């Protein structure tokens, strides 16, 4: 009997322990949540327009002060904005690059080189049902600049939100039931571990007014990672189009319903009624799924696409064209944001919750930036801070060309690291043996180029139009391309012709993204791809015509000669064919 | 010891119950388990803020779908898209206008489904998940949207009578999360373990203060109607299931003149009532919407006309109308007035 009583007592103890356990688990979860929020709150921005007439949110992503927000938040700010942080300070910032279609803006804060910053997560790993939290400044309530936190659930992933007009398409976005209200726009969406997985910016508004309705959308951080390089270029970034429309057929297959004959997809073999199987490395099973993939890539990228015709699978690499013309893009970059976006709350708007509601600064807190004098103060009335002026350069097609020049110089310096620029000015001779036997010899000069093969010599002069004679035959213009390669090295950034930093892009045979300079000389356009770590030129492309295949030249097996790295292997591709692979064993540069 | 034994058992049970809840499936697992039972429904609408889509849930392995009775079903071409992306033409099996609940049938077999018999009752404070295709954001095989929330209160909608426009007067689960958006009607409310608790109702706006109600109808309230629909009540008549009488009944003979039948599915609204007719005597008024003839669902003027072909001219008919938000039943006899009318008409 005694033993039985002991057992009972033990079991009762176990039961009461079990009773206490959930409470402990809940407390533990709560303290973890608080710790995560405390860790990340310092990188959240309250974004204000210089005249204090609105605002939004943002998040810092690098210690030197680069930060993300929504395009529709920075649009009313012009080039300068002011960002409040949880340290109670307000920092001046300048717009770097904007993506009006994807509703993203990159800005740079000044005043520190040790800004607290968010670590970027992997939004492709997010699942419906994951806990997430949004931070920012809804209804401009944070008069003490401490961000508001709202916690919720991921309601859906890989969501597609139709563009408002032809702009502000939210492709592949994250849908959350987290409260997102006016003022949250541009602010971070964090996963439960505090990793940045998206930028909040849009909600489904229908009949209930412009407040949270339990369905808000965040731009996925993986999409922003794709665009980050192009945003750093300072340009008004464009999204991509395949040059083909897709739809679901009666059997639910995603098929090509229309295709432009001038598109790269057409040149690579894609035709009407082909079934799209995968795109950008992701299986495609719905038209929305296709649009989701398309929406995450910048204009100009080459992306793998697989299609099926007559039961046979074809894998191609397609070059994506831009959605807008430059004129359209500029018009859109200065237009009004549409209604589905979280509007800019005005100070005084929002829930009237007590004496401190409505965005009015409290007496004991630093005043909100409001250099303007009231509602009549327009953008022009606000003096631009000196630091912003020093970091701003106007150029057509760009949000801020200053940052493009920064990037150009970075790429240029990395390519020419330790090299004597005068050492490349003479005639370049590259010679070696062909894999199929025989010898080759390139000669590149400031006035032309030649290639000597066992079958004979091809000579090309750079007089008149470069794209007029694309020699040698079937190469797509290897000699003009190599001429431009030499010209870039000899003339440099300033004298090559038009040359800008495009941003980053993938390159076949290379892992990760590489730096791209895009230029034009006379009638041809060209792109130079650089290794972001080593600085080597990995490839170049020369486009004789907008709707024609370029001559692609790939450089590899670099070896140091005379203080400068030179490629020992040069591979030439045109269209779907390999033209030749040259192994350089001798040369004089 | 004997006295202690029940106490011991209670403690043991409690102990295991706690362990069970600790080991409860994560939300992500629950979502994976529930999503295959959620259906996207497309039908009539698309104009004036009336969306052409809503949600539903599979309730049998033979393709029965529970959803809300709404304008979306006012067409012969209702489409149901399952979670795996398969698309089916859905047939309106029947509907109960009192609860605004409808059952559709698709030609699918072996699908995942909610067993209504296993639906649970939940109380205020219960953590729940709502599944629906809000704002039509999911297409094809894209999963429905999931929202988390808590039951705020279990109350009767009747308490708000006059404020919300719905004929439903039963108990509801009021939720603390904005679940009842466009397209949410017919969605599933489940516990965190994935047990079915309710069906998301149609959007309800309080006309007094312009606020919106977020709620679900408890499955227990719907079950009888669903069973009756599946058993053949409130169903749309199958053609040629019975013999036509020698002379069929027509509504004008009872004094009811309907609005012109101009749409694919014109709702059978009363345009006017003939003076002195049985309909007028019974109290039928213009703008009443005929929803039931006997216990058969009347979805349109055409359905009503074809159903009446099977009613004998002399028979008494029972008509249920929706007036404002009230359902009223009338019995219409073949009265003298009708006979008078008959005399004046050429045979």
Image: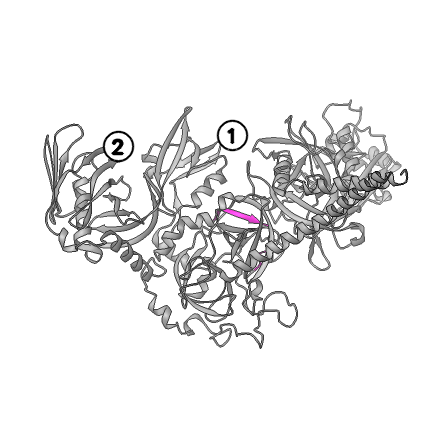
Asked if B229 appears above or below A213 in the picture, the reply is above
Mark sitting earlier along the chain (2/1): 1
Q: Is residue A451 left or right of residue A84?
A: left
Q: Is residue B189 left or right of residue A97?
A: right
Magenta range: A170-181
Residue A270 got which mark? none
Q: Which residue is mark 2?
A: A577
Locate the N terminus of chain A and report the quarter of the image it occupies. top right
- Percent x, y of residue A85: 50, 66
Label 2 element class: strand
Q: Is residue A449 left or right of residue A502?
A: left
Q: Residues within 10 Å of mark 1 (few under 14, many from 20)?
A: few
Asked if B138 appears above or below A275 in the picture, the reply is below
Judged from this view, the residue extending furthest toward the right is B3
- Percent x, y of residue A167: 45, 52
Have a look at marks 2 and 1 and say if they share a chain: yes
| Front in this rendered view, residue A451 or A329 | A451
* Callout 1: chain: A
* Callout 2: chain: A
| Front in this rendered view, residue B285 or B37 | B37
Asked if B84 appears above or below A34 in the picture, the reply is above
Residue B167 visible in this rendered orientation of the protein: no
Q: Quadrant of residue B252?
A: top right
Label 1 element class: loop
- Percent x, y of residue B133: 61, 43
Q: Which residue is mark 1?
A: A250
Estimate the spatial distance between the alpha carbons at disc 2 and disc 1, rounded to whole Å: 36 Å
């Amino acid at each position: 009997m005694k033993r039985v009583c002991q057992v009972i007592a033990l079991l009762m103890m176990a039961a009461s322990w079990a009773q206490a356990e959930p409470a402990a688990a809940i407390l533990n979860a709560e303290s973890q949540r608080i710790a995560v929020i405390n860790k990340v709150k310092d990188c959240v921005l309250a974004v204000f327009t210089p005249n204090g007439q609105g605002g939004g949110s943002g998040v810092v992503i690098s210690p030197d002060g680069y930060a993300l927000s929504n395009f529709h938040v920075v649009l009313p700010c012009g080039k300068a904005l002011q960002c409040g942080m949880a340290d109670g300070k307000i920092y001046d910032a300048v717009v770097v690059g904007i993506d009006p279609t994807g509703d993203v803006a990159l800005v740079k804060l000044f005043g520190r080189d040790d800004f607290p910053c968010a670590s970027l997560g992997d939004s492709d790993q997010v699942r419906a049902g994951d806990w997430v939290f949004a931070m920012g400044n809804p209804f401009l309530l944070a008069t003490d600049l401490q961000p508001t936190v709202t916690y919720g659930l991921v309601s859906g992933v890989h969501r597609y939100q139709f563009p408002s007009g032809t702009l502000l398409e939210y492709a592949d976005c994250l849908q959350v039931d987290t409260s997102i209200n006016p003022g949250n726009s541009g602010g971070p969406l964090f996963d439960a571990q505090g990793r940045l997985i998206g930028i909040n910016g849009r909600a489904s508004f229908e009949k209930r007014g412009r407040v949270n309705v339990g369905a808000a959308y965040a731009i996925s951080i993986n999409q922003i990672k794709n665009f980050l390089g192009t945003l750093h270029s300072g340009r008004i970034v464009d999204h991509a189009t395949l040059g083909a429309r897709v739809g679901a057929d009666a059997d639910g297959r995603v098929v090509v319903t229309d295709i432009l004959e001038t598109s790269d997809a057409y040149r690579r073999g894609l035709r009407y009624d082909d079934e799209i199987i995968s795109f950008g490395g992701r299986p495609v099973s719905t038209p929305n799924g296709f649009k989701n993939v398309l929406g995450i890539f910048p204009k100009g990228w080459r992306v793998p696409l697989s299609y099926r015709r007559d039961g046979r699978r074809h894998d191609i690499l397609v070059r994506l064209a831009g959605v807008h013309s430059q004129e359209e893009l500029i018009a859109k970059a200065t237009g009004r944001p549409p209604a589905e976006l979280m509007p800019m709350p005005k100070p005084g708007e929002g829930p009237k919750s007590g004496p401190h509601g409505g965005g009015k600064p409290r007496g004991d807190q630093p005043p909100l930036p409001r250099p303007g004098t009231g509602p009549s103060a327009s953008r022009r009335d606000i003096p631009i801070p000196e630091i912003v002026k020093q970091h701003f350069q106007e150029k057509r097609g760009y949000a801020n060309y200053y940052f493009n020049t920064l990037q150009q110089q970075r790429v240029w310096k990395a390519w020419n690291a330790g090299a004597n620029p005068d050492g490349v000015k003479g005639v370049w001779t590259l010679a070696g043996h062909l894999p199929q036997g025989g010898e080759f010899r390139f000669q590149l000069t400031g006035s032309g180029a030649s290639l000597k093969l066992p079958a004979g010599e091809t000579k090309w002069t750079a007089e008149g139009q470069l794209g007029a004679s694309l020699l040698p035959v079937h190469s797509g213009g290897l000699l003009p391309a190599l001429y431009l390669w030499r010209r870039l090295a000899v003339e440099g950034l300033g004298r090559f012709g038009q040359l800008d930093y495009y941003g980053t892009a993938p390159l076949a045979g290379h892992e990760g993204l590489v730096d791209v300079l895009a230029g034009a000389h006379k009638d041809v356009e060209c792109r130079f791809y650089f290794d972001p770590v080593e600085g080597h030129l990995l490839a170049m492309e020369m486009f004789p015509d907008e709707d024609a295949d370029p001559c692609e030249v790939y450089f590899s097996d670099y070896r140091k000669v005379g203080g400068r790295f030179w490629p020992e292997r040069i591979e030439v591709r045109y269209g779907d064919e390999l033209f030749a692979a040259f192994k350089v064993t001798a040369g004089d540069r | 010891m004997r006295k202690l034994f029940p106490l011991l058992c209670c403690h043991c049970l409690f102990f295991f119950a706690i362990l069970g809840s600790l080991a409860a499936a994560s939300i992500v697992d629950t979502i994976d388990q529930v999503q295959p039972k959620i259906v996207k429904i497309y039908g009539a609408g698309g104009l004036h803020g009336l969306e052409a889509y809503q949600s539903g849930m599979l309730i049998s392995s033979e393709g029965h779908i529970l959803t809300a009775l709404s304008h979306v079903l006012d067409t012969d071409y209702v489409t149901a898209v399952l979670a795996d992306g398969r698309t089916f033409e859905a047939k309106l099996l029947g509907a109960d206008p009192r609860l605004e609940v409808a059952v559709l049938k698709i030609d699918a077999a072996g699908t995942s489904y909610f067993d209504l018999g296993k639906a649970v009752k939940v109380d205020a404070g219960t953590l729940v998940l709502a599944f629906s295709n809000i704002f039509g954001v999911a297409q094809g095989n894209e999963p429905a949207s999931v929202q988390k929330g808590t039951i705020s209160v279990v109350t009767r909608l009747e308490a708000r009578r006059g404020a919300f426009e719905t004929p439903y007067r039963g108990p509801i689960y009021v939720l603390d999360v904005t679940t009842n958006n466009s397209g949410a009607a017919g969605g599933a409310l489940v516990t965190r373990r994935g047990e079915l608790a309710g069906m998301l109702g149609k959007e309800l706006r309080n006309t007094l203060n312009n606020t919106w109600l977020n709620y679900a109808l408890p499955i227990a309230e719907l079950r009888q109607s669903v069973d009756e629909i599946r058993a053949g009540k409130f169903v749309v008549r199958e053609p040629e299931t019975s013999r036509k009488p020698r002379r069929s009944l027509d509504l004008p003979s009872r004094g009811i003149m309907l609005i012109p039948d101009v749409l694919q599915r014109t709702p059978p609204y009363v345009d006017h009532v003939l003076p002195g007719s049985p309909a007028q005597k019974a109290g039928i008024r213009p703008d009443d919407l005929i929803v039931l003839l006997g216990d058969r669902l009347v979805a349109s003027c055409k359905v009503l006309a074809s159903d009446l072909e099977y009613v004998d001219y002399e028979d008494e008919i029972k008509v249920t109308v929706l007036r404002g938000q009230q359902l009223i039943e009338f019995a219409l006899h073949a009265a003298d007035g009708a006979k008078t009318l008959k005399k004046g008409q050429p045979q």
